[in-house]
Structure formats: C-alpha cells, structure tokens
Amino acid sequence: MDIFLQLLIGGILQGGIYALGAFGLSLIFGVLGVLNVAHGDFLVLGGLTTYWLYTTFGLSPFLAIGLVLPGFAFVGMVAERVLVRPIRARTAHEFLVASILITLGLALAIEDLGAFAMVQPVKGIDYSLAPVRVGTLVISSLRLLSLVVILVLTLALHAFLRRSLAGKAIRAVIENKEGAMLAGINVSAVSRNTFGIGIALTAVAGVFFITIIPVEPYLGIPLTLKYLSIIVLGGIGNLPGTFLGAVILGLAESLVGFWLGAEWSVTVAFVILIAILLLRPKGLFG
C-alpha cells in the first residue's frame, strides 16, 4: 500500500509538470495555429536556467520561478515576433507546414547548442527537504511542495483566462478569430502574449522537472510528443481536460515504470496517442 501511494504521488506530480507544458502548447496551437515542435526544448532551457541559478547564486528552485517566468515570457514574445509573425500571411496549410519546419529547426538548434555548451552530459539539482512521515509512509516534501505550487499556477492560469480582459481575449481568439477581430480585439497582440505565456509555462515546468529528473539536451522533442499526446487525450483547447490527460499520463508512466521497467514507461505516451487517434479523435473529454 505504501509503495502504491508513493507511485500515486509521483505520478500525479509528473502529470502536473506535464500539464504546465501542455497548457502552453494547447494555448499556442489554439490561438496561433502553430504546432511548436520546439516547445519541449524550452522546458530543457528552463531547467538549465534553474540549474545555473542554483549552482551560481544558490537560488532555490522555487525562488527561481520568479525569474524564469517573466524571462521566458519575454523570450516567447520575441520568438513569435521573429519566427512566426513573418509567415502569418500565408494560407492556413502553408502556415502550418512552415511553422512546423521553423520550430523544428529551432528545436534542433537549441539541442545542438545545449549539447555543445554543457560541460557535463546530464544535469540535475541536488535539492531536498525533510520528508513528511505519515505512519509508515514517507512522502517527499519537495514533491508535495512542487505539486502545491503547480496546482496554484494552474488555478492562476484558469482565473487569468476566465476573469481578466487579456484572458478573455485569448479565449475569444481560440473560439473565433474572425469574430474576435470584428469585435476590435488586437489579434497580433493576443498572439504575441499567448506565445509568451505558453513558453513561460513550459519553462516553469522545467524548474520542477530538473529537481526530480536530470535534464539532457536532446530531451526536448520527445517531451513535445508527450505534450501532443496529452492535449489530444484531453481534447484540444480543453484546459481542464488537458490537466486530467497529463495526470493520466503521469500515473501511467509511474505504474508502468514500476511494474514493467523504466524503459517501458517511455512508450506509454505514444501508445496512448495512437489509441486516442484511432478510437476517439476528439479526446476523452471532448
């Protein structure tokens, strides 16, 4: 029973980390129609930035969020202006293909530069807190605190999209871009802000990721495929469904990794993606 609860907590935390990145990919695709292949690489960059802040300045990963979030939001806005906006005038099909190729090139460039810059092949943060003991059960305080912060960020994102004018503008563009333009919404500004938010969310996911799993340069594209599996599982554009899909994937990886071996947990996302595309293309939650 104790082992099962440990696996349950670990799976939910892993799912929460996946959810932050998947939220960003879902928002970017919903507003801009861009399938950002480099999305997972920004998680790696967020993790490496956290590693640098921790080893150089001794900054706690939780405090590093205050720098990673606005810093990568700015990076995302610049990336949208430089890489995405110049191809916006193309037809929908041409735009989708061009955006995939451009972000794929960006992903490969980030991975190669990261591999060249890293002195050690794998990096992780040796950061720990005193565990919580409940009877015979020992729970990692770091994982619990990370899960709480992830839930707070998720609720904050939900409140932002539901209550703020900028969030409502994002939702309007997702629902009907032409109608939003007729209503006077600046779609270019919404696209820029959404890309910044999406990149910032996945970079923050990297803050938590590097505290539990070592980060290596070529992790980005496989993570992007996992994000894609999650948003297909939860229903594209459905953020609550995305969160549930991420938790399902995290739990599946945790349980499969324990019972069948860690090497099998890597394939879970792709099995889920194929099954959902074949059996329920709209996702489990519509």
Image (cartoon, grey):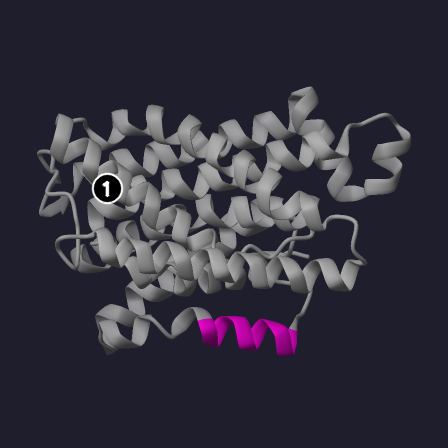
Above or below, comparing residue 10 to residue 149 in the picture: below
> Label 1, on which residue?
143
Q: In which image quadrant can residue 171 be found? A: top right
Q: Nearer the viewer, residue 227 or 197?
A: 197
Residue, x 76% and y 64% (percent of image)? 93
Q: Residue furthest right?
A: 182
Disc 1 secondary structure class: helix
Residue 230 showing in the rendered view = no
Residue 275 belongs to magenta span? yes
Binning the other alpha carbons within 10 Å of mark 1 as few (below 14), some (14 to 19) or many (20 upward) gives many
Q: Quadrant of the N terminus?
A: bottom left
Residue pictured at 20% horizontal, 40% vertical? 51
Q: Nearer the viewer, residue 36 or 249?
A: 36
Please indicate whether residue 281 sits to the left or right of residue 218 in the image: right
Instruction: Tell me which segment is drawn in magenta.
Output: 270-279
Residue shown at the point (48%, 32%) measured from the top left: 73
